[in-house]
Image (cartoon, rainbow, N blue to C red):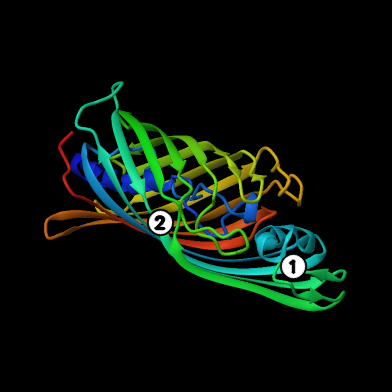
Amino acid sequence: MAVRDLRRTSWAAVATFVLGFAALSISASQPNAAESAKQFYLLGSNTTLAGISPPPGTYLSNWKYFVTGDASGNGARGVALDGIGATATLQTDVDVDANIFIDLPFALWVAPHKVLGGHLGLGLIVPFGWQDISADASALTTLTLPDGRTVQRGRQFSVSDDTFSFGDPVGLAQLGWHRGNWHWRVAGLLNIPIGAYDQNSIANMGFNRWAFDAHAAVTWLDPTRGLEASTTAGFTFNGNNSDTDYRTGTEFHVEFALMQSLSKTFAIGLAGFHYEQVTGDSGSGATLGDFKGRVTALGPNVNYSFQLHKIPVSTSLRWYHEFNTKNRLENDTIYLMATIPLAPRPR
């Protein structure tokens, strides 16, 4: 892998970074406990090339994100909380199925001059997409649902919801450095709660809360042998949802990738992540208690770069299978990313 190919690879890192934004009102099937059993940070986004900052310039990237998942017990109750109601959720056995497709376009500008010896990047993501979530429940006692229906003990009922809408925009900033084969980066991501949100819906693209994620990433990349090892670790801090008086606890995430380049344009390897909620949920809306969650995931990762009318394009395809789950949906997740530089500048 020549130096020029390392530069091309770093453009792919733009997308890898930006998506680590914590994300976006992504689905109720996002891996964690938390309110509605979903999280702000997009797990699995900061794996391969996570520590590499792109050269100065302007970049456009797009992620396609598809998730299918299911859950029972507390994980399902967390997803169905708004649609069934706090009291009713506690008095039911619930099973949930979810299918989500999110499109994540974003832009990143990397400053032409160094800051603190590193490359400063600023960006914005505006997610939109589709969610289809259904919950099948069995009443453990006679109860009244938020829509006025009365369900007798032992009877089964269903709640379903779907939406196509915009999520919360996410602002991001990063600062990255490199020396030899080592590359490292620190980043902050801010969720801005103006996306589509309905307190009584189980399919929301927005979170209706401010949230901030801070993370750091390191990549070791040997361009001679084409070997890469990357890891990212960080914490997500959540604000209060004023409509539900629910504050999701602090969340920890760690991600990694081990990759081998088979040519100047093609690399394959293994990627994964682990999530753990380190403090409990709080507020009067947290009727399920602390509701701490966790998840681990592993899967293959393929990176491919090519020229499109002399424009370098970097792509990445990832699949994650989740296990070791608690208080969340168990998912299979597919990511597809493409990045192009609009106005790259030489380092």
> Residue 163 in the image: x percent, y percent?
50, 69
Q: Residue at x 41, y 46 (%)?
A: 170
- Viewport quadrant of the C terminus: top left
Mark 1 surroundings: few (<14), some (14-19) or many (≥20) residues within 10 A: many
Q: CA distance from mark 2 to mark 1?
A: 29 Å
The answer to which quarter of the image holds residue 136 is bottom right
Residue name at image x 71 percent, y 49 percent: 285
Where disc 1 sits, the SS reads strand
20 in relation to 88, above or below: above
Residue 197 position in % (x across, y down): 53, 58
Which residue does the numbered mark 1 point to in the structure image? 94
The answer to whether residue 236 is seen in the rendering is yes
Give amino acid for label 2.
Pro
Residue 266 coordinates in the image, percent (x, y)? 29, 55
Q: Which mark is residue 152?
A: none
Query: Going by the image, does 272 lie left or right of 244?
Result: left
Q: Is residue 102 something that shows in the picture?
A: no
Closest to the observer, 54 or 34: 34
Label 2 neighbour load within 10 Å: few <14, some 14-19, many 20+: many
Left or right of residue 111: residue 106? right
In the rendered image, the residue lying farthest to the top is: 116
Depth check, front residue: 295 or 139: 139
Name the residue tied to disc 2. 127
Quarter of the picture holding the N terminus: top left
Q: Secondary structure at mark 2?
A: loop
Residue at x 63% of width, y 60% of height? 329
Q: Is residue 233 above or below residue 241?
A: above
